[in-house]
Amino acid sequence: MRRVAVYQGSAARGDKKANLATTAQAAQAASALESDVLVLPEMFLTGYNIGLLAHQLAETPDGPSLTEIGKIARRTHCALVVGFPERNGTNTYNSAVVFDARGALVSVYRKIQLFGPEEKKLFSPGEELVIVDLAGCRVGLAICYDIEFPETARELKRRGAEIVLVPTANMTPYWEIPTTLVRARALENAITVAYANHCGQDGNLDYTGLSGITGPDGIDLVRAGPNTSALLIADLPSAEGLTLSTQLADLRLGELQM
């Protein structure tokens, strides 16, 4: 993986057709800019703040909307990571699907750390961390609140992740999450973190925006503002830089274990 893209925008509440159209447009633009993967926000397929509608709109990974996302990936030759409500038996999960650039389903990750009483009422928690091989890179998945826990990023790194892709729906007043905690997760583990957030108002929620791609030195490669749609593109650090950062991270980890 050489280049990663992050889309920040507003999902249409409950309107899969409109959100698939936006996904296709963003993927086409990311592909034109030679991105290997595009990350979209949490629950972007349906919108995040939809309450019980999440159960009605939930799909299995082979459902019609997920099949269309695979077609978009194949048509644009760009891998996609898209948040959606997943149906599995009687359970609904807050999930993210991963399709490679050929349109093949690579994996589905289920959010482990559910945020607040509303998410815990709507969704079952996931139980397994996910790392996949994507575009020649070891990729870890997290969704929003997951990345705020140091243990999540540390374990993904321990299992070989070079980059963590994070669909999110971070809202006010949590302004410091994208710019402080996400950067800390990148720095302390010497990994790149790509963080894709919603922006604007969504019912009773105001999203912070501030999507970004942060390098393994904790320095932003690119960062969006709070209120506007944006397509962020960044080249991943060179192998030499990654090696040095990894050595420093291992040194810090060794000091902590003494």
Image (cartoon, helix red, strand yellow):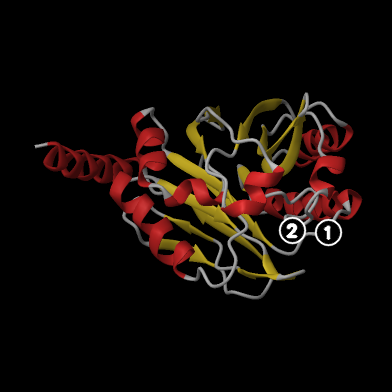
| Residue 193 on image: x %, y % | 46, 50
Mark 2 to mark 1 CA distance (whole Å) = 7 Å
Element at label 2 = loop
| Residue 235 on image: x %, y % | 49, 52
Label 2 sits on residue: 49
In the image, taking residue 19 as reference, residue 111 lies left or right, namely left
Dividing the picture into quadrants, the one containing residue 71 is top right
The residue closer to the viewer here, 46 or 56, is 56
Query: Residue at point 81% right, 38% down?
Result: 58
Question: What is the residue that sits farthest to the left in this orientation?
Answer: 258
Label 1 sits on residue: 13
Query: Residue at point 81% right, 56% down?
Result: 22
In the image, taking residue 155 as reference, residue 250 lies left or right, namely left
Label total for image: 2
Query: Residue at point 84% right, 49% down?
Result: 53
Residue 217 visible in this rendered orientation of the protein: yes
In the image, taking residue 44 as reference, residue 216 lies left or right, namely left
2 and 1 marks in contact (CB < 8 Å): yes
First-in-chain label (2 vs 1):
1
The residue closer to the viewer here, 172 or 182, is 172
Instruction: Tell me the amino acid under the disc marked 1.
Output: Arg
Above or below 14: residue 10: below
